[in-house]
């Protein structure tokens, strides 16, 4: 059994290595087209993924037609494929080259938060080519740490992280993150956190996402309330008009503190209220750019105790 598992992991690694190296040899435009083609084949082979995305879109946009939802799903698949193509090109993306691919918007918001000296938590989600966002930020001169869930296949995990860290960023393993994040913030560092996925009951609170209670990580709220770090929305979106990505930083989210508590103290109501605020930021971005968010994730999977699953499959 262990031998079969080892063989499977070697095959996974070999496949990932082959795809990355093949696409990496291509010009950028061809690599993006190659990635999109692979993504559409992958989704055709796994129809349940389209089913999840379609169902999520029905929850979020109940008044939409089936044609509208299909269009968004196809747009999402294309974005995922493009991200794969971009990822394969990371070894070629120098500081000069990245300026031809990514435009910085609102960087003054990020710099203002950084000047406060208490560290910056970058609130983000799975938008467009999200792997490109921290990579580009570092190439623009602002390297950061980022939370990442470890891939079960250690070889694949090492391969992926070797690309992620080429521009000077540092990964923090998601399941062992608290101490490392606190240390980075204490040093005035920047930490990117994806805050748009379903969370288990023990690690989240229920706040509305598209009007439906969704179990959401409280980690950002707790870290910000404890350290005083600024929470700056930062996200990457594809801009068709200019044929480039925009890496956008919005003004820091104002934190809510209730009662007469000291700077490092907070209440559970503070945690819930700020988590709701962060989730509203994510929702607003998704509403404006629905084809650039990953609908294939079961965002409303965790339910309050005693409540049946939203998903019928």
Image (cartoon, helix red, strand yellow):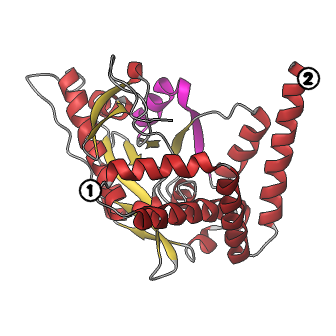
Q: Quadrant of residue 21?
A: bottom right
Tell me the element at label 2: helix
Does residue 171 appear in this view? yes
Q: Nearer the viewer, residue 133 or 272?
A: 272
- Compared with 149, 117 (above or below) is below
Q: Quadrant location of the N terminus? A: top right
Image location (x, y in percent) of residue 100: 57, 77
Does residue 282 appear in this view? no
Whether tag 2 and tag 1 are in contact, CB under 8 A, the answer is: no
Image location (x, y in percent) of residue 242: 47, 82
Q: Mark 2 or mark 1, which has the lower sequence index? A: 2
| Classed neighbour count for the residue bearing mark 1: other residues with Cα under 10 Å, few (<14), some (14–19), many (≥20) | some
Residue 256 located left or right of residue 164: left
Q: Which residues are magenta?
A: 168-189
Residue wearing tag 1: 251
Q: Nearer the viewer, residue 206 or 130?
A: 206
Q: Nearer the viewer, residue 6 or 268?
A: 6
Could you tell me which residue is drawn at 73 percent across and 68 percent down? 34
Residue 6 inside the magenta-drawn segment? no
Separation of residues labelled 2 and 1 (CA atoms): 52 Å
| Classed neighbour count for the residue bearing mark 2: other residues with Cα under 10 Å, few (<14), some (14–19), many (≥20) | few
Could you tell me which residue is drawn at 8 percent across and 24 percent down? 259
Residue wearing tag 2: 3
């Amino acid at each position: 059994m262990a031998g079969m598992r080892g063989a499977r992991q070697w095959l996974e690694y070999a496949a990932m290595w082959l795809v990355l190296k093949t696409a990496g040899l291509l010009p950028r435009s061809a690599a993006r087209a190659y990635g999109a083609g692979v993504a559409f084949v992958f989704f055709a082979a796994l129809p349940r993924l389209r089913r999840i995305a379609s169902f999520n879109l029905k929850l979020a946009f109940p008044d939409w037609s089936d044609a509208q939802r299909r269009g968004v799903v196809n747009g999402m698949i294309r974005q995922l494929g493009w991200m794969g193509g971009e990822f394969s090109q990371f070894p070629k993306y120098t500081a000069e080259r990245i300026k031809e691919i990514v435009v910085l918007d609102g960087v003054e918001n990020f710099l203002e938060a950084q000047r406060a000296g208490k560290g910056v938590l970058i609130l983000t989600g799975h938008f467009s080519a999200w792997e490109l966002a921290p990579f580009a930020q570092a190439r623009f001169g602002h390297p950061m740490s980022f939370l990442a869930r470890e891939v079960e296949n250690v070889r694949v995990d090492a391969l992926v992280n070797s690309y992620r860290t080429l521009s000077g960023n540092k990964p923090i393993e998601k399941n062992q993150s608290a101490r490392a994040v606190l240390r980075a913030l204490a040093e005035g560092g920047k930490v990117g956190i994806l805050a748009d996925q379903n969370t288990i009951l023990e690690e989240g609170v229920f706040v509305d996402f598209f009007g439906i209670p969704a179990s959401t990580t409280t980690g950002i709220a707790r870290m910000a309330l404890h350290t005083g770090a600024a929470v700056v929305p930062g996200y990457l979106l594809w801009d068709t008009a200019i044929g480039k990505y925009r890496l956008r930083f919005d003004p820091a989210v104002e934190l809510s503190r209730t009662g007469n508590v000291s700077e490092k103290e907070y209440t559970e109501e503070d945690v819930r209220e700020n988590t709701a605020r962060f989730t509203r930021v994510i929702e607003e971005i998704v509403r404006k750019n629905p084809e650039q968010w990953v609908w294939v994730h079961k965002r409303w999977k965790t339910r309050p105790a005693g409540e049946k699953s939203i998903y019928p499959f």
